[in-house]
């Protein structure tokens, strides 16, 4: 005889609850009623009544074992749900009953100075009114949902278009960071939201956004209003629409850059926001753009990838790729245009979206992305259809005028750089005299186009930490350091780290010293512990396995920084399900968490890459257990260290040797 409990999320705050014998909803599984097969139908009716009365949403049944009145969930997901994230004992129900601090009024939020922040697209009154109006509209939608005027199915499309998900432990709000650029004021506003409306932290994502994992539904209109005060929003961070446009985290600063992509990313943002034709696409749609010959934005793994170029005459134009993506069917994009002139930029973007919107599969969720359309129609036919649509559109009506480009470019106030020598005596002396600083400089800085400056990367991957997580205190510190050292500007990298883009070499040692003890000082950018990882089953309702604990255990195994530096450059990405939010397909080493008959198993791929040699990794063989996955990674890296040529990176050794020696070592008898 099977036994079950019935769980749900409370509507107003998203808290996980269980149905008890009296038909009420309780916050502890120990108080839940246990139903055998004969009683389950009646329990389902009671649960349905709870949904009808706007008490709960997302009702689900979960099998349990009953031992001396102790209810033990038989699935890992329900077990995590009853306690809280396995990686944060201070969160969820395992943290105990703590009185929540009173929420200060919205007026208590910091009011940004609205100064012209260098590197930030500066909003005008129309932009700000738009954000405030959207927050007000969503407030009314939330009120209608709680009042029962909207069903959950009717409300879902509104909350998703405003970035609000329902996850394992409650609601999650995804906030946009357009093309990964923030001002110090905006970072402080995010810290405020984390402190007041969440659990004191936020999670930076691979789309350069930030997620808050514990907001209440009733608070989200206030959160959006507070964010709008700082020119921040959550518009189109979910739903079947054009999502946050991403770019190189060093855009506008990188020494190798030929075109600053931020201007064109902002043009794409404005064009795509509330686009009447593309708000309800067959599936979500992601665009990335870079202006460097060295792709740091993974443009070939996007629905549309844009590489800004200059021709021999110095004119700006674009190389366009389409049909890339990860998830269930990972595909590297097809190049659809070698050269696209700036005036035709939006017309061509629109032509691609029109073809996709008309022909994309709406009948099959797993075949709805543009990558499937390109594959099934064949690239040559897809390109022909786009070119046909492009030619039929009025060039004048869609022309991107130089005056528009210049006007938007003027909103990005240039930093007031000093004229400095290429070599800083102060910097060189500090690097020579402090080995720890020298190690950090080697991994955590990037060359700047302006002499005497450098971009500094602040790692969100301390050993044993959660990749991408930042506390409110850390966000406040980053904001202060940005004001002091980087013209008030911060960047979010798609690798889930933060960047101060414009730091004087003379100031770099002082900046590094300021990071001491903050959890932001780890010298591991591009090394094995600089792991990309999605939240996995600890938070996500779609996950099939945990990802964060795997990332933590790998980082701890390779905690010796000398060993990490000896291994050298390698990307390691982890996803908790086939949706691939952790980009496992394009890690040099990729790990995918799976559910094998209720047990976590991890599939490993090798050879993935997100740069200008983009590639999808190859599955090495059968999946390994949770207990064995760290050993497997170590075995793979040991083969690399033993077989590499001098100065050869992991992915180059893999390409030279192929998968065979790694597979032989991993599955050798006795392993």
Image (cartoon, grey):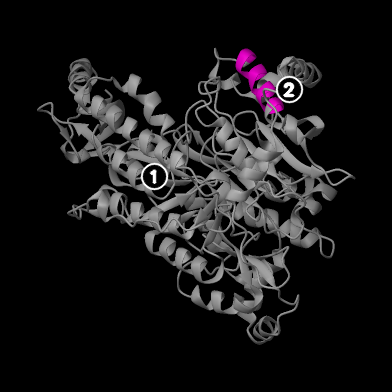
Q: Which residue carries the number 1 mark?
A: 228
Q: Which residues are magenta?
A: 347-359
- Is 434 rendered above or below residue 560? below
- Is 458 rendered above or below residue 179? below
Residue 19 locus on image (x, y percent):
19, 29
Closest to the observer: 623 or 329? 329
Residue lying at the far left of the rendered structure: 22
- State the mark number for residue 83: none
Residue 494 in view? no
Tell which circle, 1 or 2, labels the residue nearer the N-terminal end.
Answer: 1
Residue 472 locus on image (x, y percent):
38, 59
Closest to the observer: 275 or 61? 275
* Residue 507 left/right relative to 465: right
Residue lying at the far right of the rendered structure: 312
Instruction: Kindly identify the residue that appears in the image at 62 percent across and 44 percent down.
Output: 407
Instruction: Kindly identify the residue that appears in the image at 33 percent across and 43 percent down.
Output: 225
| Kind of element beneath mark 2 | loop
Closest to the observer: 16 or 620? 16
Residue 109 locus on image (x, y percent):
30, 55
* Residue 329 left/right relative to 237: right
**Label 1, residues with CA under 10 Å away: few <14, some 14-19, many ≥20:** many
Instruction: Kindly identify the residue that appears in the image at 55 percent across and 21 percent down.
Output: 281
| Kind of element beneath mark 1 | helix
- State the mark number for residue 395: 2
């Amino acid at each position: 005889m099977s036994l079950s409990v019935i769980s749900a999320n409370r509507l107003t705050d998203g808290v996980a609850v269980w149905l008890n014998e009296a038909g009420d909803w309780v916050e502890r599984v120990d108080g839940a009623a246990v139903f055998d097969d004969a009683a389950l139908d009646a329990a389902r009716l009671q649960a349905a009544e709870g949904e009808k009365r706007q008490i709960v949403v997302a009702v689900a049944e979960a099998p349990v074992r009953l031992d001396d009145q102790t209810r033990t969930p038989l699935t890992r997901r329900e077990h995590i749900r009853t306690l809280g994230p396995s990686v944060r004992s201070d969160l969820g129900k395992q943290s105990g009953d703590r009185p929540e601090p009173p929420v200060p009024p919205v007026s208590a939020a910091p009011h940004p100075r609205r100064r012209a922040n260098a590197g930030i697209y500066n909003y005008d009154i129309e932009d700000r009114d738009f954000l405030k109006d959207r927050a007000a509209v969503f407030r009314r939608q939330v009120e209608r949902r709680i009042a029962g005027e909207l069903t959950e199915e009717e409300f879902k499309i509104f909350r998703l278009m405003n970035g609000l998900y329902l996850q394992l432990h409650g609601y999650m709000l995804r906030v946009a960071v357009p093309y990964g650029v923030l001002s110090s004021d905006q970072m402080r506003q995010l810290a405020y939201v984390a402190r007041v409306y969440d659990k004191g932290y936020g999670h930076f994502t691979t789309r350069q956004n930030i997620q808050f994992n514990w907001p209440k539904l009733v608070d989200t209109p206030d959160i959006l209003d507070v964010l709008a005060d700082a020119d921040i929003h959550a518009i189109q961070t979910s739903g079947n629409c054009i999502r946050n446009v991403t770019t190189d985290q060093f855009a506008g600063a990188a020494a190798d850059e030929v075109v600053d992509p931020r201007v064109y990313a902002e043009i794409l943002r404005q064009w795509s926001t509330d686009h009447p034709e593309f708000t309800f696409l067959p599936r979500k749609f992601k665009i990335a753009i870079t202006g460097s010959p060295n792709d740091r934005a993974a443009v070939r793994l996007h629905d549309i990838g844009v590489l800004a170029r200059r021709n021999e005459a110095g004119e700006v134009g674009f190389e366009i790729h389409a049909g890339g993506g990860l998830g269930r069917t990972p595909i590297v994009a097809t190049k659809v245009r070698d050269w696209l002139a700036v005036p035709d930029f939006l017309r061509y973007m629109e032509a691609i979206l029109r073809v996709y919107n008309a022909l994309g599969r709406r009948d099959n969720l797993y075949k709805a992305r543009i990558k499937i359309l390109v594959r099934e129609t064949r690239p040559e036919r897809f390109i022909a259809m786009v070119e046909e649509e492009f030619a039929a559109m009025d060039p004048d009506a869609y022309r991107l005028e130089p005056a528009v480009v210049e006007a938007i470019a003027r909103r990005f106030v240039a930093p007031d750089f000093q004229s400095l020598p290429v070599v800083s005596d102060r910097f060189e002396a500090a690097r020579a005299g402090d080995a720890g600083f020298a190690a950090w400089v080697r991994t955590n800085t990037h060359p700047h186009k302006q002499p005497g400056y450098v971009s500094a990367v602040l790692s969100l991957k301390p050993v044993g930490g959660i990749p991408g997580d930042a506390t409110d205190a850390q966000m406040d510190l980053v904001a202060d350091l940005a004001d002091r050292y980087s013209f008030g500007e911060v960047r979010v990298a798609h690798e889930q780290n933060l960047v101060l883009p414009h730091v004087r070499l003379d100031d770099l040692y002082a900046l590094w010293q300021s990071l001491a003890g903050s959890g932001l000082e780890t010298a591991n950018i591009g090394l094995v512990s600089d792991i990309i990882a999605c939240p996995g089953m600890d938070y996500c309702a779609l996950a099939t396995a945990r990802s964060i604990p795997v990332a933590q255990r790998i980082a701890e195994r390779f905690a010796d920084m000398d060993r990490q530096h000896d291994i050298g450059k390698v990307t390691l990405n982890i996803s908790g399900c086939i949706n691939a939010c952790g980009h496992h397909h394009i890690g040099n080493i990729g790990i995918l968490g799976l559910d094998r008959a209720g047990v976590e198993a991890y599939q490993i791929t090798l050879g993935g890459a997100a740069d200008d040699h983009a590639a999808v990794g190859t599955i090495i063989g059968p999946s390994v257990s949770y207990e064995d996955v760290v050993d497997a990674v170590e075995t793979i890296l040991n083969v690399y260290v033993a077989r590499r040529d001098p100065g050869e990176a992991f992915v180059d050794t893999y390409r030279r040797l192929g998968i065979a020696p790694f597979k032989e070592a991993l599955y050798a008898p006795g392993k």
